[in-house]
Amino acid sequence: IPWEQIATAAQLGGQCLAVYVAVHHRTALTGQMPTTLPRALLQQLGVSKDAKARALRQLERAGLIGVRRAKGRTARVSLIDRQNVSTTQAAAQ
């Protein structure tokens, strides 16, 4: 995980860093994106359902993840490669 992204997640406060690490873990484990965050995984990190929802919103606003939400379904989370985003934006200018 790039250090800059870890630092950004940590500065958001709350359970953002734990949720961000969980997203990376699930992506590496399953090899799939988007991925879900099982309740048992988050419980191991001490993250409640409400804290997960807050953290996903904050991480999404910070540009670290993308979230697809559907009523009655668990959120599907994708990592955003900020290095490629920066490189693409620089090339476009």
Image (cartoon, rainbow, N blue to C red):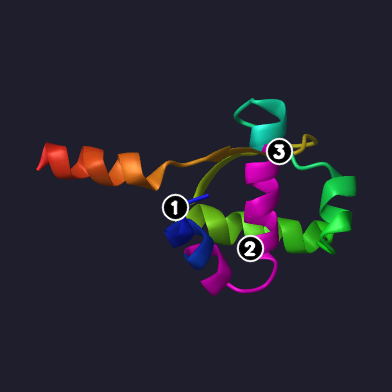
What distance separates the C-alpha of mark 2 from that of mark 3?
A: 14 Å
In this rendered view, identify the residue nearer to me: 69 or 91. Answer: 91
What distance separates the C-alpha of mark 1 from that of mark 2?
A: 14 Å
Q: Which residue type does callout 1 highlight?
A: Gly
Image coordinates of residue 5 in percent, x first then y, are 47, 57
Magenta span: predominant SS is helix
What distance separates the C-alpha of mark 3 from that of mark 1?
A: 19 Å
Disc 3 + disc 1, Cβ < 8 Å = no
Res. 74 image quadrant: top right
Q: Which residue is mark 1?
A: 63
Mark 3 Cα shell of 10 Å, populated few (<14), some (14-19), many (≥20): some
Q: Residue at x 53, y 49 (%)?
A: 1
Q: Which residue is mark 2?
A: 17
Q: Residue at x 21, y 43 (%)?
A: 89
Q: Is residue 64 left or right of residue 54?
A: left
Q: Residue at x 34, y 45 (%)?
A: 83
> Which portion, as a residue range, is magenta?
8-26
Disc 2 + disc 3, Cβ < 8 Å = no
Q: Quadrant of the C terminus?
A: top left
93 shown above or below 58: above
Label 1: element kind: loop
Q: Which residue type does callout 3 highlight?
A: Arg
Pointer 1 or 2: first along the chain: 2
User: Is residue 32 located in the magenta-colored stretch of the structure?
Assistant: no
Q: Which residue type does callout 2 highlight?
A: Leu
Q: Which residue is mark 3?
A: 26
Q: Is residue 45 left or right of residue 36?
A: right
Image coordinates of residue 48 in percent, x first then y, are 84, 61
